[in-house]
Amino acid sequence: MKQIISVRDLEELLRNGQDLSSLPGDALLTPSARDFLREHESAASQKSGSRSPEESSARPVTVTSKSSKSELEGFFNSAAIHDLKLQLCDVGRRLWQRAYVDGNGGNIAIRVGEDIALCTPTLVSKGFMKPEDMCLVDLEGNQLAGIKKRTSEILMHLQIMKRQPRAVATVHCHPPYATGFAVAGVQPPTCMIPEYEVFSSVAIAPYRTPGTPEMGKLVSDLVDKHNTILMANHGVVSWSHNNVEDAYFKMEILEAYCRTVLVASQLGKPVNTMTPEQLQDLLKIKQSLGIPDPRHGLKECELCDNDGWRPGVTCAVPGRNSEPVRDSAPAVDPQAEALVQTITDQIMNRE
Ligand SMILES: [Zn+2]
């Protein structure tokens, strides 16, 4: 999948001795990458005089919500945006195939400029979208281009992008296992699977009516330190600093994790968790990948002494409440068992 160009990509090109002016003309840069490129260009022009017209014309397309209608239309119909529209269709199809969306549920957005985003339409199954269904909006949710009406839940995506400048893409859906945790108001316990610890940073936002600014605010209040938000009694929304596929990966990781935790909690044995040292190793990897986590910088002993902000999780610390998952498994009711036995006996005796 083609990626939006980030600062990291530009730095990588420079490290490899490549010329940034040779970026493809239809490339899309994140806002911070654009700033980086601008600074790099002005530094380069101070060194060697101004750029030739040929070089200038090779610069990536940049439009804002204030651009003219025809500029916006041209941008919306450009090859680079078409590629992103295809990515939205692809991620939508994967969400539907994995049963993470139902009916017309779920929505996806990609930031494509300083104050504009591409997003999915309302009232269309995410499994069957076409590139021409997509919509261009400003960060207030006003539609700038596209035939179909933009998703009714776009405000939440845009509020995430406004609060978290690194967010280049957002995905919202209703995966059943993760949504089950969101309905129960249970934060998935930690320290069990490395993939989840490294790539996910999960918090729960309280319920509000979908699509309202209040819902968006409660979610966006959490995106500074979390990349995946369980929305109580609703679903999940994630953001990525890389691309839309990466935002989608957050869903796969969370859903697989919730499913695994649920299975492990039903096996009748205490769940084994990592030690604080093992978790610290994973957090180091997480930090190096630029993925936020409220536990970055905590001492090892604090990683596990976290009952206050993540109730029930103890991270292999002996003593108090060391079997959180087993504790949450349903206890066998002897009266109910006796009742089932009596009914079974009566049915058998009828034969
Ligand atoms: Zn929803």
Image (cartoon, grey):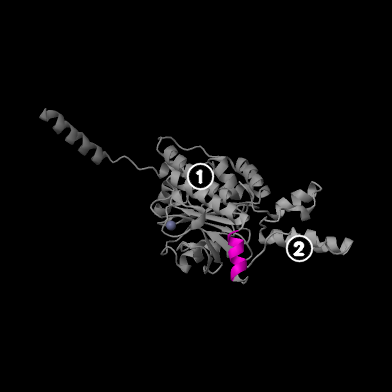
Q: Quadrant of ligand 1?
A: bottom left
Q: Quadrant of residue 270?
A: top left
Nearest to the observer: residue 125 or residue 40 = 125
Foreground mark, 2 or 1, reads 2
Residue tagged by mark 1?
A: 252
Mark 2–mark 1 distance (CA, rounded to whole Å): 36 Å
Q: Which mark is drawn over residue 190?
A: none
Amino acid found under the numbered disc labelled 2 = Arg
Marks 2 and 1 in Cβ contact (< 8 Å) = no
Q: Secondary structure at mark 2?
A: helix
Nearest to the observer: residue 16 or residue 147 = 147
Task: Note whether residue 201 is visible.
Answer: no
Amino acid found under the numbered disc labelled 1 = Glu
Rendered position, 145 above or below 273: below
Rendered position, 27 above or below 315: below
Nearest to the observer: residue 336 or residue 165 = 165
List the single residue furthest toward the right. Answer: 48
Range shown magenta: 69-77
Rendered position, 112 above or below 341: below
Q: Residue at x 55, y 54 (%)?
A: 85
- Whichever of callouts 2 and 1 sits on the residue coming sooner in the sequence is 2
Q: Residues within 10 Å of mark 1 (few under 14, many from 20)?
A: some
Residue tagged by mark 2?
A: 38
List the single residue furthest toward the top. Answer: 351
Nearest to the observer: residue 261 or residue 298 = 261
> Is 176 left or right of 16, judged from the image as shown?
left
In the rendered image, residue 105, in percent from the top left (x then y), is placed at 42, 55
> Is 46 left or right of 247, judged from the image as shown?
right
In the rendered image, residue 90, in percent from the top left (x then y), is placed at 52, 47
